[in-house]
Every structure is written in structure tokens, then in C-alpha cells.
Image (cartoon, rainbow, N blue to C red):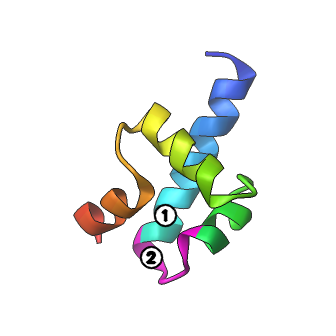
Amino acid sequence: MSVKEYVEQARVAFASRLLTETTNTPEAIARQAGFGREATLRHAYLRVLQISPLEYRERFT
């Protein structure tokens, strides 16, 4: 695993916690997790988990 992949997976894990434990918007979670924009968060989720952040929240909340 490259450093880039590790960092992305760590950010997705942190964002996942925020999605399930808070009511923050995806935009706010993207900033908090270091993705900057919601679109970047969404692309990372699709790469790593094969689902969108909102689908993740619906399944695991």
C-alpha cells in the first residue's frame, strides 16, 4: 500500500465515524476529514468502499 492509499483510507475511516456519529453535512465532513470538498470525499468513498458517503450513512446509522 502506498502512502497516498494509506492516507486516503485513514481519511475515509475518520469520515465514516463522522457520518455515523454526527449529523454534520457531507460538505462539513469532507473538510474535517481533509478532503476539502464533498466531491473529493465522494470519489474517495467510491474508490475505497464502492458506495457513496450518503449510502454509507444510511446503511450504518
Res. 26 image quadrant = bottom right
Q: CA distance from mark 2 to mark 1?
A: 6 Å
Of residues 27 and 24, the one nearer the viewer is 27
- Residue kind at label 1, given as amino acid type: Arg
Q: Which residue shows up at 61% across the image and 59% down it?
A: 38
Q: Which residue position is annotated with label 2?
A: 21
For the residues bearing labels 2 and 1, Cβ distance under 8 angstroms? yes
Which residue is at 46% across, 34% downward?
48
Q: Is residue 23 left or right of residue 9?
A: left
Q: Label 2 neighbourhood size at 10 Å, few (<14), some (14-19), many (20+)?
A: few
> Which amino acid is tagged 2?
Glu
Q: Residues within 10 Å of mark 1 (few under 14, many from 20)?
A: some
SS for dot 2: helix
Q: Secondary structure at mark 1?
A: helix
Q: Does residue 31 appear to the left or right of 22 in the view shown?
A: right
Q: Which residue is mark 1?
A: 17
Q: Is residue 24 magenta?
A: yes
The magenta span reads 20-26
Figure check: 41 above or below 24 = above
Report the side of 58 relative to 42 (left or right): left
Q: Which x, y percent locates residue 20?
A: 40, 70
Q: Is residue 16 magenta?
A: no
Name above or below for residue 50 compared with residue 25.
Answer: above
To which quarter of the image does residue 10 belong? top right
